[in-house]
Amino acid sequence: MIKYSEDHEWIKMDGDVGTVGITDYAQKALGDVVFVELPPAGDSFAKGDEVAVVESVKAASEIYAPVTGEIVEINGTLEDAPETVNSSPMDNAWFFKIKLSDMSELDGMLSEEDYNAFVEGLE
Amino acid sequence: MRYLPLSDTDRSEMLDTVGVASVDDLFVDVPKSAQQGVSFDLPSHASEMEVEKIMSSMAAKNISAGSVPFFLGAGAYKHHVPATVDHLIQRGEFLTAYTPYQPEISQGTLQCLFEFQTQVAQLTGMDVANASLYDGSTGCGEAVLMSRRVTRRKNAFLSGNLHGHYGDVAKTLTSFTDDNVESLSPTPHDAKADIDALMALVDKDTSCVVVQNPNVFGEVLDLTPLAEKLHENGALLVVVVTEVISLGAIKSPGEMGADIVVGEGQSIGNGLNFGGPYLGLFATRQKFLRQMPGRLCGETEDATGKRGYVLTLSTREQHIRREKATSNICTNSGLCALAFTIHMTLLGEAGFRALAKLNHKHTVDLKAALGKVSDVEVLSNSFFNELAVVLPQPATEVVEALAAKEILAGVPASRLFPNADGLDNILLMAATECVSESDIAALVTALWEVLS
Amino acid sequence: MMNRQGRPSQPEKNAPNKGIQTSTGNYGLDIEEPLSYELGNIHTSGVDLPSCGEFESSLGGLERNSDIGIAGLSEPEVLRHYTRLSRKNYAIDMGLYPLGSCTMKHNPRLNEKMARLAGFADIHPLQPQSTVQGALQVMDTLSHWLKELTGMPAVSMSPKAGAHGELCGLMAIRAAHEAAGNPREYVLVPESAHGTNPATATLCGYKVKTIPAEADGRVHAALLKEYLDENCAAIMLTNPNTCGLFEREIIEIADAVHEVGALFYCDGANFNAIMGRVRPGDLGIDAMHLNLHKTFSTPHGGGGPGSGPVVFSERVAPYMPVPLLENDADLALVEGMDVPNSIGRLTAFHGQMGMFTRALTYMLSHGADGLKQASDDAVLSANYIMASLQDVMSVSFEGPCMHEVLFDDRFLKDRGVSTLDFAKAMIDEGFHPMTMYFPLVVHGAMLIEPTESESKASLDQFITSLRSLAEATKQDDVTRFTGAPHFAPLQRLDETAAARSPILKWTPKAE
């Protein structure tokens, strides 16, 4: 199952652990990504907390936790290859895996269809 | 007015183009009430000759370092600056350029900054250096804030033998953040006691310890054990160097395990200038790069593949991050950094080491000469070019008496630590390459007279 | 027979000059220059020092034994290396430098000469004060000028630059609130503000609330009141603002701010528009920094040093940083940390003396009359540019403007040319570009500040050039813009590569 947020993040669920990244729309809006700052594994965040930062040459964008939970794994490859965010936002450039503390938070998120409609509305 | 090229004819033609009758009409948005009855208790314009006279008469009231036997240090040092340095920094292309935001027409400034960053990284023994901060003291405050960002801890400890102004600046800068910055008391008689006390304070909540080397009393320290203790606790060692020429003689902070090195670069290429403008050196380890404040210059290529330089990693800075920036700093000390770079290239490693050796030699000579003055005790054992000396009388009085004899003898320690006890009789002295044998002889003679 | 032919003294007509590959990579005066590290080595020195022979050192066994790596060059090589590099820079000395909000005015060389007098350049900050009375007199005289020009009762000379001045001002404001029992919670900053403003507020422990820009580019007291309450500590407002406009309702704004007990910080970066005409003290301002490196002509030096003294109202003055300068029988610096109420020390020593001497020299040269004329000329020149370009470029806000004029990219719509392209094409025309993409309140901002230092001929050449560029954007082929600059030492640089894998120092090539 994959869900989306209005902040242009996706979360792919496997049991109670979700893998989080940013969408193709988001990477295009950011331009060439030059750095990704990730949280330390083990830290906990509430939904809406600032959890990571994506930087392009002229902008820095905060990534907010789409759900509440504990970071169980981060994607260390982004440190050396931030350009992956541009080339493979939905697959190789996942940011972190988070263990959800409240599965019901997913209910408030967008389906793929809803997200695509949301993005169309922005353009 | 000689600086204003527009003639009255030009002005009236321009007003016609704009379509207003007078310049006053361009200020319609300024409240009338604020424009009426404004007068100033200030003189009218003056010729170059007149201005020179006024400024020169003020300059003449000061005793300049080069005109007398001179032994002041304590964060600002009298060194010889080669003529080439001042000539080059006065080239208009360097002097009158802005921050190099347009790299295609700023490669001169940018390449010099790249050389500067390389020199600072090498001198401090660190991986990366920025393109300069205002001065050493503000850099010290920035290092405390940076340690907080890196460790996400709030407790910083400052050595008691850190230059008093530097400690004060760090405390002021963090007055309204929730950092806890604690300063120990100066220990002029026992440098090791201060390090031991710092070691005892470090725990898992410590963000950093700030130590000056050589310390404000001139003592050279091995900081390796302190670094180890800090790293065991996940905390950072910040090393402050106020006399950058010491790095040509003593082991670098990087070799001793420093995580951040803050330096005052004035000694190379820059004059005393009554305290400013000076040059903040700031270097750290690669892994902390993204938390470093200040501008950075990096290498890249242009559209045709030619090597060039740009300001980079600017997402750390205020003009992009605004309230989330690593620092509010914007301006750096570009021209002072240029003077530093040119002087350092003139010296080269060989000249830099020779200069350091000469400074140390003159200070060894000074210590020997002072040792012969009765009732004067030199506290420093291991030192570079500064000594702490205990006098039989308050240092401030002795300094004034010697100044009356046209000898500038040093800085009373109490001037740096106005609230500390037991420092009244301690004088901080420095001997650079500019100090001659006859200067030392004159000092010793005058000291005998003043103390008798 | 003697050779009477001599050398040719007229050029060949239509001599070929394209496509030549020189063996050096240099092209006439356009000379490639490697790094000092690629030219020199650790054994060469351009300095002769007296030998000190052997002696017993007292370094505590902490000698630095391994190589540091600093490359040295002989003196002639140093002179040539840095002279060659200097020629790759644009500078005010070379031409118009219209960077908005940066005030790139003429830097008189008398300033440089005065700052280098031994009595100023070669004195130590901690000499006995009896030996530096002339230096203190410079500080005192400059303080007097700054207080008179701003109509404010107090000034702190400590801050090292504009942003440092903001910190000084806002910290004193916070201290004033704390002394009254409540530091308050947030600072109001307009959308058009310099990035240093919000960064400073954060350092002072305040949240930042942004006031949106209104259609005429100004802050209005009516809207402001909606954002103001008892938790507001201060407003930080630039006036004239970064759109080049004077805040018409400034007095009403000050009244509204004071009504809720908040204080008014003014960013004085744009003071060059109003010197000798308006005193900020008459507008209800509580603290304001002045950039000596903008308004008072101390050189920018490729990024600094600056100097940012802060003037204060009676209400905030007691919280100024140390040292304080007292003028009794003798001039004296009060340096202790025990000055009641002071926020403490912001920097070692006493501020940027080297900038004080330059700024004071500039002020004495102008006099009060000359400073007013300078402001008038700066404002007139900006309005002249606005009037001369408004039919071909899009002026963002109706005039009159103050000392800078803001354009946006509406005139480039559908032409395949961005603000960046347009600015880079100015380089080919022999000008430094204007400030671009700032302020953020209009799209593709181009902020032009000519200053008072330009002759009418210089302004006219600039106007003609921009008009021809604006015309050229209508052509089908815009590579003139998208590929610009074509005639600079380098073409556009890859900033993405620089940021992705930062190379921040020279390293020896692997053997």
Image (cartoon, grey):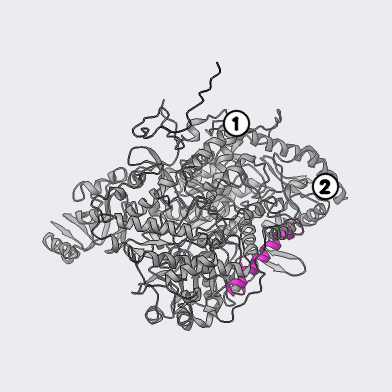
Q: State which region is magenta.
A: C129-157
Residue B121 in the figure: left or right of residue B361 = left
Please, which residue is most extreme toward the top here?
Answer: C1
Amino acid type of the residue tagged 2 in the rendering: Asp
Q: Main secondary structure of the magenta part?
A: helix
Q: Chain of mark 1?
A: C
Residue C469 in the figure: left or right of residue B362 = left
| Discs 1 and 2 share one subunit | no
Question: x%, y% of residue C424?
Answer: 36, 51
Would residue C271 be seen by someone viewing this image from the given angle?
A: no
In the rendered image, residue B151 lying in the magenta stretch gets the answer no
Q: Nearer the viewer, residue B33 or B180?
A: B33
The local secondary structure at tag 2 comes to: loop
Q: Residue at x 76, y 47 (%)?
A: B67
Would residue C468 be seen by someone viewing this image from the given angle?
A: yes
Amino acid type of the residue tagged 1 in the rendering: Ser
